[in-house]
Image: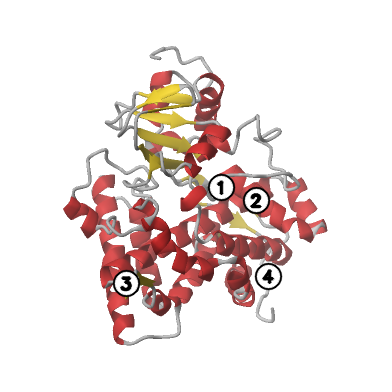
Amino acid sequence: MNESGCGRMGGSWEEIDNGLLNPEWYGDRDRYVAGFARLRAEDPVHWTENDSFGRHHWTLSRYSDVSDYLTNDRLFSSRWDTRAPNSPERRTPEVRHAQGWDVSISAMDNPLHNVYRRPVNKHFSAPMVAKMADSIRATVDGIIREVGPTGSCDFVAEVAGELPVRVIMSLLGVPESDWEKLRRATSRWRTPADPRWMIDNDRIKTFDVGITEVLDYCSELAQSRRREPKDDFATLIGTIRVDGDLLSLHEIKTWFSVIIAAGLETTRNAAAVGTWLFITHPDQRELLAATPGLVGSAVDEVLRWVSPSRTRLRICNEDTEFGGQKMHSGDWVIGLLGSANLDESVFDDPLKFDITRSPNEHLGFGKGIHGCLGRNLARLELKTLFSRLFTALPDLTLAPDAAPYWIPDYNVTGFSSMKVEYTPVDTATR
């Protein structure tokens, strides 16, 4: 499909193909949502001639196909990573080891994946996370106390981004003096095309620097806990055994990096874009205020609408037929979670933000063996924030002429910044 006309929904196939792994394409939500819609309608299992990225691949856009491939880990491997990389070049064994891919659960298939993840699952179960409710409530209230008197703030930096930083870093026992350093390094790793973090206008270099900085810090943290155990999750990770043996320092530091990156990213982006949705949909904000019991449903609708991580990468393990197309062993297959969550055949009026939506079997946390480990924690953070934020700052609104700026990234859906205003609140006695 090489049609060149641009009048069709979502642009030409060439524009769509070369946009799917182009961070800048996602700076315009209307453009990529229209592109997703065209893929679903005309070619849901689409051979993507992505010359801009440098590698052709399959793209899945319908809910049923994306859901099926996420749960078929025998046929579709995560051995490269769950996220499409910044470069199509093969990761050598030396690079895989240096960046932790050789022991990262993100790049593991079963049965090894379950061997590594099973000992950690129980610590992120709903009952275990529920024990953190008071602590997270105190964290949310503390952030509100800090920004309340100012009457304005950058919501992404001072609220949405601050919440998971405080929760995850405290959980791991990272000293507060190191939080900002890790936040910056994680942003370089996960969103290297964002101008705020890019080094020398080179996103591959930025990615390499970011992941190295995170892993170097995590290595120091792992060694510290081996020398001097503490009452924190970092020490607990150090007690995990695989095949009867304690994890190596290399394995521990990689676990830390996975928890930090995923923990900071998903909650921040869902919290920021979710708050924007409530600001721009005052009827839904009023409904939540009148019916607090809807907060769980509201969080699910935010996750569906936002799709904090919009793409997934898998490698086809064998020649097969999928969705009526012949795939070959070694083919890249990219599933668009952000498109699946807008599939008209599954969600009525999918572009509408509706906190009463039911059922709402979104793929905001992925699905299958690589479904988000911290989904219960993220839900609790978001429920707590949305329950308390609008009560404390009832007239929270966007600052004039300060439209949020979408992060340029083909995986991450979020805002680089979002300036908000509200009536200053004396929170000294709150």
Q: Which residue is mark 3?
A: 247
Separation of marks 2 and 3 at Cα, in angstroms: 35 Å
- Give the secondary structure at mark 4: loop
* Residue drawn at (43%, 74%) of the image: 172
**Is 64 situated left or right of 50 in this image?**
right
- Give the secondary structure at mark 2: helix
Q: Position of residue 2 (x, y in %)?
A: 38, 14
Q: Which residue is mark 1?
A: 364
Report the front residue among 1 and 251.
251
Q: Position of residue 310 (x, y in %)?
A: 49, 42
Q: Which mark is residue 300?
A: 2
The quadrant of the rendering that contains the N terminus is: top left
**C-beta proximity under 8 Å, tags 1 and 2:** yes
Q: Estimate how packed mark 2 is, as few (under 14), some (14 to 19) or many (20 or more) residues with alpha carbons within 10 Å.
A: many
Residue 395, image quadrant: bottom right
Q: Position of residue 314 (x, y in %)?
A: 39, 40
The quadrant of the rendering that contains the C terminus is: bottom right
Q: Which residue is mark 4?
A: 425
Q: Estimate how packed mark 1 is, as few (under 14), some (14 to 19) or many (20 or more) residues with alpha carbons within 10 Å.
A: many
Separation of marks 1 and 3 at Cα, in angstroms: 30 Å
* Amino acid type, mark 4: Val
